[in-house]
Image (spheres, rainbow, N blue to C red):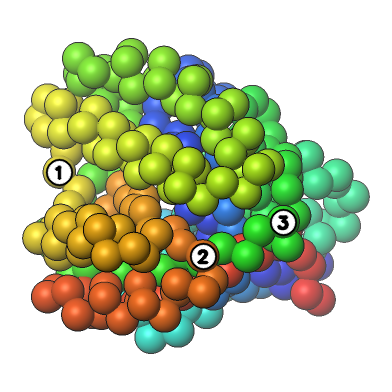
Amino acid sequence: MKATAAAHANIALVKYWGKRDEALLLPEAGSLSVALDKLLTTTTVELGDFAADSFTLDGHPEDPCRARALLDAAGIRKRARIASGNDFPTAAGLASSSSGFAALAVAACAAAGLRKSADELSALARIGSGSASRSVPGGWAVWEDAFARQVFAPSHWDLRFCIAVCAAGPKQVGSRDGMRATRETSPYHAAFIAQCRRDLPDALKLLAARDLPGLGALAERNALRMHADALAADPPLLYWQPATVACLLALLELRASGVAAWATIDAGPHLVAICASSDAGAVEGRLRSVPGVTEVVVCAPAGAARVLS
Ligand code: PMV
């Protein structure tokens, strides 16, 4: 009744920001992501007759409420002891729900002896957080409905994703609440969702053709539009720090000097620069020189979530 699984966090190039069904956690529009090799979460689940569920993240106790929702959806009634650890180099503030709930879904089903397909595991991870559905198949993944699927293997394209850790500011609004508030109050939300529905098929064509200027520019536009949508919420959602903006400007400069790199930003202050592996050193070095950037983690595409023991 005990198992350990590992999963990689993913970064979306076409973002998920809004649910069409809050109860089933289904997205308003499809999203596209890539799993990141350096952002690995390992989770051990032990099932038994414990007094209550428990959940620790890097040794610190956390609320097991969302984990319980996932276990209930899997039909696991026994209490769970869940210990999760992030294997991120020296970077702080990169904790990701995507790798966490993907590893939890895989470990919990293995601990319970449930034989689930990859699609079923992805649908279970979705109960924890939508983006976690994409960390189960890993690689380049698309999520539109109940589960995500891998559309290209990690080996399809040797890109790099340079994560600039921008000094964490005051406590931000989590993505679940943030996207709900945006959907309910932002006058730009319908336009953002309509744009995502156009962006996804275009992004898949650019990905198939390994067109970096095309996909990079599309991903950057999509992320900035997501933030424009969130900024237009009432009250406004501002996820950026000064270093985030400074990194965006640094990428503009890099492009002007002939280094091809584009940005994406999730619901937080950190910026992820997308570039060719041959340019990763130059991009990493430039981002490290930006005031307020405390760390840069350079990632390559990674594979699916897996049972370790
Ligand atoms: O699934 P959540 O609740 O972690 O929301 C993810 C939201 C973004 O990271 C901003 C976008 C995305 O598609 O991952």
* Badge 2 amino acid: Ala
Residue 276 - label: 2
Label 2 close to label 3 by CB (< 8 Å): no
Q: Hey, which quadrant is residue 173 in on the image? A: top left
- Which sits earlier in the primary sequence, circle 2 or circle 3? 3
Instruction: Quote the CA–CA distance across marks 1 and 3.
Output: 35 Å
Relative to 40, residue 89 above or below? below
- Residue position marked by numbered label 3 in the rendering: 156
Residue 12 - label: none
Which quadrant of the rendered structure holds the C terminus?
Answer: bottom right
Image point (31%, 69%), residue name: 164
Relative to 262, residue 61 above or below? below
Image point (59%, 58%), residue name: 35
Image point (22%, 68%), residue name: 166
Tell me if residue 61 can be seen.
no
Q: Residues within 10 Å of mark 1 (few under 14, many from 20)?
A: some
Residue 238 - label: 1
- Which sits earlier in the primary sequence, circle 1 or circle 3? 3
Instruction: Quote the CA–CA distance across marks 2 and 3.
Output: 13 Å
Which quadrant of the rendered structure holds the N terminus?
Answer: bottom right
